[in-house]
Amino acid sequence: MTKVPTSKRQAILDAAKRVFLANGYTGASMDAIAEAAPVSKPTLYSHFHSKPELFAAVIAEQCEVLLVTLSRVQTEQPNPVAGLKAIARAFVDLIYAKESLDLYRLIIAEQQNFPDLGELVYRSGPEPVLNRLSAYLGELDRCGALRTSDVDTSSRLLLGMLQGAQHFRCLLGLQPGLSEAEKDHLVDAAVSLFLKGHAYVG
């Protein structure tokens, strides 16, 4: 299989995101994406064999910055406050971004017609994020920084606090997003509550 150069791959992902958001999953075609990139169809299919695979790659790319932050924090193992705030801020920046909100709406709208799409998307973005966060919390537990008896539940609770009602309001179009000050406040409040619930003494 011929590997697509990084610049071509990025062009395909950028074009796919635009086409998916403009036309929905159903209305987006591989022909339109190839034309928008612009690349030949053989080039497109040499890296992404199908529309579902390409859509999953778009979602994975949206989560890439967050995964890089998680990896960096896990490798450097800073104190829990700094580490969790860095992770929380990257997560908040991701989920409240306009493109992320638009993609989330698209996924929900298409779920009825493409029931496998939800699982594909979950495995491409949210699942790796949760797994990496659980691994980090496990390390904090083992070194005695936090008491975390169930790292998977704790991971979901932390991300859930950062999402919550405000994210739902954004999805419904009741507010455009969060200001930088609102993001800071949300991150500080969620991390503080999380640390207190996990017996952190700083």
Image: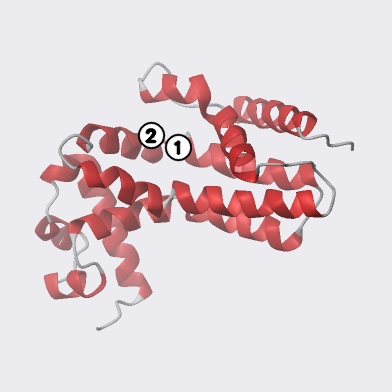
Confirm whether residue 47 shows in the render: yes
Q: Decide if residue 54 is on the left or right side of residue 147.
A: left
Amino acid, disc 2:
Leu
Name the image quarter holding the C terminus. Answer: top right
Residue 46 higher or lower than 88, as above or below: below
What residue sits right under mark 2 in the picture? 101
Front-lying residue, 120 or 13: 120
What residue appears at the point 36 percent right and 20 percent down from the top-left corner? 173
Can you say whether 140 is above or below 174 in the image? below
Q: Name the residue tied to disc 1.
A: 97
**Residue 39 placement (x, y as % from top left):** 18, 69
Mark 1 vs mark 2, CA separation in Å: 6 Å
> Which kind of residue does numbered mark 1 sit on?
Ala
**Left or right relative to 200: residue 21:** left
Tell me which corner region of the image, top left, top right, bottom left or bottom right, holds residue 52: bottom left
Work out whether residue 66 can be spotted. no
User: Left or right: where does residue 149 sit relative to residue 38?
Assistant: right
Res 13 quadrant in image: bottom left
In the picture, which quadrant includes the N terminus?
bottom left
Within 10 Å of the Cα at label 1, are there few (<14), some (14-19), or many (20+) other Cα atoms? some
Picture layout, residue 112 above or below residue 182 = below
- Dot 1 lies on which element? loop
Say whether residue 12 is left or right of residue 141: left
Callout 1 touching callout 2 (CB < 8 Å): yes
Q: Along the line of sight, which residue is nearer the eye, 141 or 113?
A: 141
